[in-house]
Image: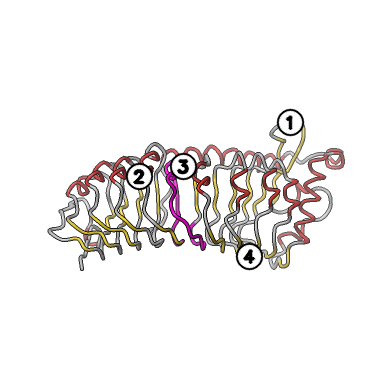
Amino acid sequence: MTQLKPLMASYYLDVLIHWVFVVVILLISLKLKPLESQKLNNPRLMQAHAALEAWTHCMTSDPNKITSTWSGPNVCNYTGIYCAPAPDDSTIFTVAGIDLKNANISGSLPEDLGLLTDLDFFHINSNRFTGPLPKNFTKLAYLYELDISFNQFSGPFPQVVLAIPSLRYLDIRFNNFAGDVPSSLFDLKLDALFINNNKFQFSLPQNFGNSPVSVMILSNNDIKGSIPSSVAKMKDTLNEIIISNTGLTGPLPQEIGYLDKVTVFDVSFNRLEGELPGTMQGMKSLEQLVLKHNNFSGVVPTGICMLPKLKHFDCSNNYFHGPFPKCPFIKRKHNRGKCMGF
C-alpha cells in the first residue's frame, strides 16, 4: 500500500491552525492550573472527575501505569488530561483534551465520558480498547478530532460520530468494525477520513462526492461496485485518496479528470477494468498514481506522462498493450513508471 505522504496545502493549513490551538490548550493547562477554590467549586471539573473515575473502572490493564496519577479531584493534573478555559466561558476551567496514545491500555469506554462536554480532541490510538463507542459522545458538541485507531473496537459502524457537530478529523482505522457504512458519512464536513483496515462491507454511494475531505483512506475493507461519477464534486478539496485492496470493480469514471488538486491516487489491488480515461491528463497535481494489480486494459494514455508533478507511476500487473509512453521525468532505476502486462 502506498505510504500516506504528508498532507498537502489546504489540509496542512487547517491542521496547523488547529494544532496551534491545541498547543495553546496544552500551555494553558501547564501554566494556568485552576486555583483550589476553582477545583472544588467548578461543576465542569467535578463532572470530569466523575467521568474519568468511571473510565478507570472500565480499564482492565494499564501496564505502563499511565492512570496512576488519576486520583483526587484535580483532574487537570492527571497524565494525558489537558485543561483550558471553557469555549463558552473563559472564566471557567474545563477538560479540553485527552491524549492517551501508545499507552497499551485495555478496557472499554463508559457512557460517562459524555460528561466531558467541552472536549476538543480525544486521542486514544494504539491501545487495546474494545467494544463500541459510547452513545453519549453525541454530547461532545466541541469535539474536533476523534482518533481511536489501532485498537480493538468492534460492532457496526459507530453511528454516534454522525451526530458530533464539530467533528472534522475522524480516524477509526485498524479496528474490528464491521458491516455497512452509512451513506451519510460522506455528508459530514470532515477534513480527514480514515476507516481503512476494518471489516466493513459497503458500496460507495452516489453522495460519495459530497465529502469535503482533503484526505480519505478506505483501504482493506470490502467495497462492492465502482467509484461513482460524483467524485468530481471533490475537486476543490481532495488531495489524497487511497482505496486499495477493497474489491472495487468497473472502469474509472471520466470525471476522475476533474480532480486537479489530488496528489496521491491509489486504487491498487482491486478488480477495476477497462481503459484509463483520457481525462486523467487533467490531474495536474498528481505525484503518485498507483494502479497495479487490476484488470485495466488498452493503451496507457500519453497524457499521463505529461503530468508535470508525477513522480511515481505503477500500473503493473494489468492487461495494457502497446508501447508504454515515455515518461522522461520518472526515474526508472527505482522501477517507477513500469507497466507490466500479462
Mark toward the start of the polypeptide (2 vs 1): 1
Mark toward the start of the polypeptide (1 vs 4): 1
Q: Which mark is residue 128?
A: 4
Q: CA distance from mark 3 to mark 2?
A: 13 Å
Mark toward the start of the polypeptide (4 vs 2): 4
* Colour mapping used in the image: secondary structure
Of circles 3 and 2, the one toward us is 2
| Mark 4 vs 3: CB contact within 8 A | no
SS for tag 2? helix
SS for tag 3? loop
Residue located beneath label 2 in the image: 229
Amino acid type indicated by mark 2: Ser
Amino acid type indicated by mark 1: Asp
Q: Residues within 10 Å of mark 1 (few under 14, many from 20)?
A: few
Residue located beneath label 1 in the image: 89
SS for tag 1? strand
Of circles 2 and 1, the one toward us is 2
Taking the image as shown, residue 181 lies to the left or right of residue 242, namely right
> Picture coordinates of residue 58 (x, y %)?
75, 62
Quarter containing the N terminus:
bottom left
The part of the chain drawn in magenta is 196-221
Instruction: Please report the residue visible at 46 percent of the width from the left and 40 percent of the height from the top.
Output: 212
Q: CA distance from mark 4 to mark 3?
A: 30 Å
Q: CA distance from mark 2 to mark 1?
A: 46 Å
Q: Quadrant of residue 125?
A: bottom right
